[in-house]
Image (spheres, rainbow, N blue to C red):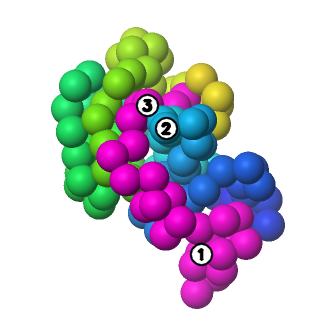
């Protein structure tokens, strides 16, 4: 497992305390599991993604990830409608380990309340939660 200072946490993303990342693009966001989450889980063998058209409220469980160690829930860090899912994860769940911020994204969401982004953490604040 990585030490906290070894984690890849891009400055241009927001982070949830539940270890998801969010990248804003106008009125939509991409969501995935961050480097800390994928590192803690180990080898990921299955990812359950939501259905396009599903709507969720911030904090709802919207999928899960299974690794050789455990099954963990994935929580949506913002409210909105699922407008795309990463279908590549069905055949290649290891993309979350290999490229958690690139090819390993989980879902794209049309925001219903953009102000919720303000409650997410920047890199520095997220690192503080990990140290605590």
Identify the magenta region.
Answer: 104-132
Q: Earlier in the sequence, mark 3 or mark 1?
A: 3
The label nearer to you, 2 versus 3, is 2
Q: CA distance from mark 3 to mark 1?
A: 26 Å
Q: Is residue 105 left or right of residue 116?
A: right
What residue appears at the point 22 percent right and 25 percent down from the top-left corner? 53
In 3D space, how far apart are the residues under numbered discs 2 and 1 (Cα atoms)? 29 Å
Marks 2 and 1, the one that precedes in the sequence: 2
Q: Is residue 118 above or below residue 105?
A: below
* Dot 1: element: helix
The label on residue 108 is 3
The spot of residue 18 in percent (x, y) is 42, 63
Residue drawn at the location 33% of the way across and 46% of the way down: 112
Q: Is residue 40 magenta?
A: no
The residues bearing labels 2 and 3 have C-alpha atoms spaced at a distance of: 11 Å
Q: Name the residue beneath numbered marker 1.
A: 130
Do the CB atoms of the residues marked 2 and 1 lie less than 8 Å apart?
Answer: no
Q: Earlier in the sequence, mark 2 or mark 3?
A: 2
Structural crowding at the residue carrying mark 2, measured as other residues with C-alpha within 10 Å and reported as few (<14), some (14–19) or many (≥20): few
Q: Residue at label 2?
A: 27
Whether pointer 2 and pointer 3 mark residues with C-beta atoms closer than 8 Å, the reply is no
Q: Residues within 10 Å of mark 1 (few under 14, many from 20)?
A: few
Residue drawn at (49%, 69%) of the image: 119
**Mark 3 crowdedness (10 Å alpha carbons): few <14, some 14-19, many ≥20:** many
Q: Position of residue 36 (x, y in %)?
A: 59, 57
Q: Nearer the viewer, residue 101 or 122?
A: 122
The mark found on residue 54 in the picture is: none
């Amino acid at each position: 497992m990585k030490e906290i200072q070894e984690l890849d946490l891009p400055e241009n993303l927001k982070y949830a305390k539940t270890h998801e990342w969010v990248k804003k693009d106008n009125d939509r966001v991409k969501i995935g599991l961050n480097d800390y989450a994928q590192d803690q889980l180990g080898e990921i063998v299955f990812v359950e993604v939501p259905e396009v058209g599903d709507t969720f409220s911030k904090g709802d469980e919207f999928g899960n990830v299974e690794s050789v160690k455990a099954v963990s829930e994935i929580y949506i860090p913002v409210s909105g409608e699922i407008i795309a899912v990463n279908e590549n994860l069905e055949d290649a769940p290891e993309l979350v380990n290999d490229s958690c911020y690139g090819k390993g994204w989980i879902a794209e969401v049309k925001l219903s309340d953009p102000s919720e982004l303000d409650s997410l953490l920047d890199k520095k604040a997220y690192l503080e939660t990990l140290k605590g």
